[in-house]
Amino acid sequence: MQTFPLYQIDAFATRAFEGNQACVMPMDAFLADAVLQKIAAENNVAETAYVVPEADGIWRLRWFTPAVEVPLCGHATLAAAHVLFAHGGFAGEVIAFDTVKSGRLFVRRLADGTLEMDFPSAPVRPVPVTDEIAAALGARPVEAWGGMFYAARFETPEAVKALAPDQRALKSLGAEGSGFDRGNFGCFALGGEGVDATSRFFAPGSGIDEDPATGSWHTMLARILAENFSTPAATCYQAYPGRGARIGVKLEGERCKLTGTAVTVIEGQFRL
């Protein structure tokens, strides 16, 4: 029997029951892909992050939802860094994560304990708002962009909070030709209570009807806010019902800085 450390983290949270859940499992080497996927399904949270040491201050990192492996996950990266800083004995200032599809990612521990992630921010482009997409979302966006995901802007934060999409219909839709975005929709509006943008993220294409806090979505939202609304640095609120998460974003060229904190809620072992 093999055993692995298991940590469940609330990421982009200041206390338990906020932000987004991620399981983090440090390993000496990655197990077979099929096993990693089964473990993620067993954990049954938004993401399970697997970290493997590579060199001093550098780890390899992979992310799995209960259904698929994904090329980038912000909240689980924040959770993985939190585990290494808080439980793994890493005393440095910056952690580097090597990933297959998103290159090298950096997480810096700031003086106040906040974690700052340095992620790529891919280009976006305007895309049509089709009748099919409007019907699946249950409301018609003002405009939309395609990229890693489909990003739909609504007039008000209240309109975003009121969305009740048809998840089955969303699962097969996306911005044409954008690859990973199929069935993954970020919906946002400018403004909100003390923030620059309010959003929700629906991801039936990744096996999650709605995600509570999504770092990868915010790398796209950061670019949209900077290039279209003259807001290169913003405070964002992801309005998942019953939880909610605040995420700081700052676009710097082809990179995006995401800031937030995390809380450990469960420590244990996974027996295999």
Image (cartoon, rainbow, N blue to C red):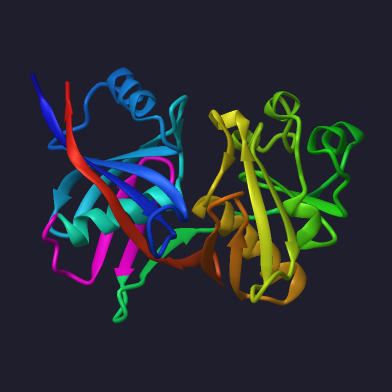
Using the image as rendered, state which of residue 34 and residue 6 is in the foreground.
6
Place of residue 69 in the rendered image (x, y in percent of width and height, measured from the top left): 43, 31
Using the image as rendered, state which of residue 28 and residue 169 is in the foreground.
169
Place of residue 160 in the rendered image (x, y in percent of width and height, measured from the top left): 75, 53
Q: Is residue 122 above or below residue 5?
A: below
Q: Is residue 182 above or below residue 152?
A: above
**Is residue 186 something one can see in this rendering?**
yes
Place of residue 118 in the rendered image (x, y in percent of width and height, measured from the top left): 42, 64
Residue that appears at 85% across and 53% down: 143
Residue that appears at 30% across and 49% down: 98
State yes or no: residue 94 in magenta. Answer: yes
Q: How many marks do you count on the picture?
A: 0
Q: Is residue 229 above or below residue 271?
A: below
Residue that appears at 44% across and 32% down: 65
Q: Is residue 135 left or right of residue 60?
A: right
Q: Is residue 271 left or right of residue 67?
A: left
Residue 49 quadrant:
top left
Residue 99 quadrant:
top left
Q: Is residue 230 left or right of residue 253?
A: right
Please give the range of residues in magenta: 88-108
